[in-house]
Amino acid sequence: MLNVRYRYKKKNIDKDELILDIETTGLNAQFENLVVLGLIYFDNKRNDFYIDQYFAKTDKEEIKLLKIYLKKVKNKKVITYNGDIFDIPFLNIRLEYHNLNPIWPNCLDLYKLIKSKRKFLSLDSMKLMDMEKRIGIFRNDPSRYKVISKLNNDLKSRNKPWPILIHNKNDLIATESLANIGEIINKKLSININDYIIYIDNANIDNNVAKIILRSNKTFLNSYFSSSNYILKTNYKKIELDLLVLYGNISKNAQGFVTINNFNIENKNSYKIDKNLITIMEDGVYNIANILNIVKSLIIENLEL
């Protein structure tokens, strides 16, 4: 077994958190093997953060990596990118294969988190390498791994550990750099009204009604307001906004949902439309600025904060 360690200057994880990324010979854990176990975590003995990578030179060494995994993740919040779908289930199947008990650690899957908010974000791709570019990371992976089949071949042969370890290290660093993405997204989806921090939690459009759920850091009195094209309800820290919307072309090549602009606010969008309308969704992405400004207008008009 090959073990590589680097001291790491952490950006977005705490001492009780751990970044996990693995490399395997294939996707089917029933027949494939764990080759690389990659971790970023706080070493209590050395009082610092480290990247630790463990490379199994043979299939027989897989069990060593699995036992290290069990030890390292104990009492840690595990942060992954697509780990709920791949890494954790794969590790559990391999643990069972070696007659070890599978575990389901407290896990934050950044991929799942971003996917849940994708309808509010303009994302062409959710691949880790594309997401890291959005926060200014441009990795220098081995050029051979621009063709994914070459990575798979190297993992199966195991005769080129260093390019694989560099690739895994880059995945670990990117995941750690994205670990606060939930805070970044919530900030993008929020507005401050007299120290009430209100953010969009969820939204869907059904039968020409946009149902938008928002949350607040402070409590509201139970209230209900309505007009010809909206209903606004507040209950404790929850805000529900129902908007009547219409679907159609908002430009020559774009479609979206609009509502009547009864809110005396400026329509902020990428396309010029009738001044009496306001965009709620365009090109499949909710217009955050318009939604938040509608909520702000209604709250200021109807509630004393």
Image (cartoon, grey):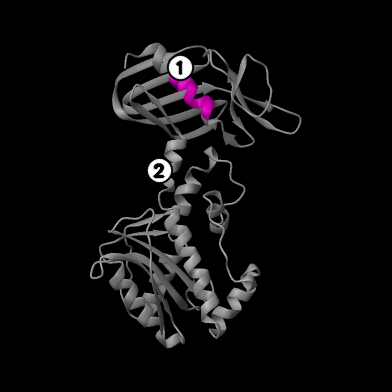
Magenta region, main secondary structure: helix
Q: Where is residue 201 in the image (x, y as percent from the top left)?
A: 42, 36
Which residue is at a point 58% across and 45% down the rendered structure image? 123
Secondary element at image label 1:
helix
Q: What residue type is labelled 1?
A: Ser
Which amino acid type is marked by label 2? Answer: Glu
Cβ atoms under marks 1 and 2 closer than 8 Å: no
> Is residue 294 shown in magenta?
yes
User: Which residue in the protein does label 2 denote?
Assistant: 183
Above or below, comparing residue 218 to residue 125 in the picture: above
Q: Nearer the viewer, mark 1 or mark 2?
A: 2
**Nearer the N terminus, badge 1 or badge 2?**
2
**Is residue 145 depicted above or below 115 in this figure?**
below
Measured from the top left, where is residue 248 in percent x and y? 68, 27
Image quarter hosting the N terminus: bottom left
- Where is residue 5 shown, x and y percent of the image? 38, 74
Q: Is label 2 in a helix, a strand or a loop?
A: helix
* Label annotation for residue 188: none
User: How many marks can you see?
Assistant: 2
The residue shown at (47%, 76%) is: 30
The residue closer to the viewer here, 295 or 135, is: 135
Looking at the image, residue 296 sits to the left or right of residue 279; the answer is left
Q: Does the magenta stretch include residue 42?
A: no
Residue pointed to by mark 1: 297
Please tell me which residue is depicted at 49% across the width and 18% down the height of the picture: 230
Residue 258 image offset from top left, x and y in percent:
61, 23
Query: Which residues are the magenta region?
Result: 289-296
